[in-house]
Image (cartoon, rainbow, N blue to C red):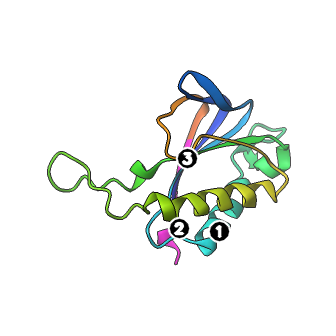
Amino acid sequence: MRAVVQRVSRAAVLVEDQTVGSIGEGLVVLLGIHTDDGDREARWMADKIVNLRIFADESGKMNRSLVDIGKEMLIVSQFTLFGDCRKGRRPGYSTAAPPEKAEPVYHNFIELVKNHGIKVASGQFQAMMEVSIANSGPVTLLLDSDKLF
């Protein structure tokens, strides 16, 4: 499982010119699911992201997590995070989970984040989406569960 995590002041997702999810201050998570991903990776990723200390404390240091500040998360599925660009000019996506496998893992990840008490908004799985992100800082992190297991 791969995630691009961005600290934001606001973010929104539109599908066919309709807002399907939006948040104020918090995190945007662009989530890619690998063919081998399941519950273990989703649990690790959810716990890791909600507890990342990337928000400022009273002295301006990044020392507080999403759980600490009680803000929101926008989660957007993004299979292109598993695009392999090593050969040719067109990315290959053979390691990205197919939709029928990825969708339950995606929804499980959303529920796991909610279980931490986080208000969650999301994109629409397998839809063409327009994502607006006001990156705060900017702070952008890459996480990959494959590096751990």
Residue 128: give x, y in percent of width and height: 46, 35
Q: Residue at the spot x=45%, y=65% of the render?
A: 34
> Mark 2 vs mark 3: which is more N-terminal?
3
Label 3 environment density (alpha carbons within 10 Å; few <14, some 14–19, many ≥20): some
Q: To which residue does mark 2 refer? A: 145
Q: To which residue does mark 3 refer? A: 125
Choose top left, top right, bottom left or bottom right for residue 116: bottom right
Label 1 environment density (alpha carbons within 10 Å; few <14, some 14–19, many ≥20): some
Q: Which residues are magenta?
A: 140-149
For residue 1, say whether it is visible: no
Q: Are marks 2 and 1 in contact (CB under 8 Å)?
A: yes
> Mark 1 vs mark 3: which is more N-terminal?
1
Q: Residue at the spot x=27%, y=55% of the render?
A: 92
Label 2 environment density (alpha carbons within 10 Å; few <14, some 14–19, many ≥20): some
Q: Which amino acid type is marked by label 3?
A: Phe
> Mark 2 vs mark 1: which is more N-terminal?
1
Instruction: Tell me if residue 110 comes above or below residue 97 in the rendering.
Output: above
Instruction: Tell me if residue 12 comes above or below residue 86 in the rendering.
Output: above
Q: To which residue does mark 1 refer? A: 44
Cα distance between the residues tagged 1 and 3: 21 Å
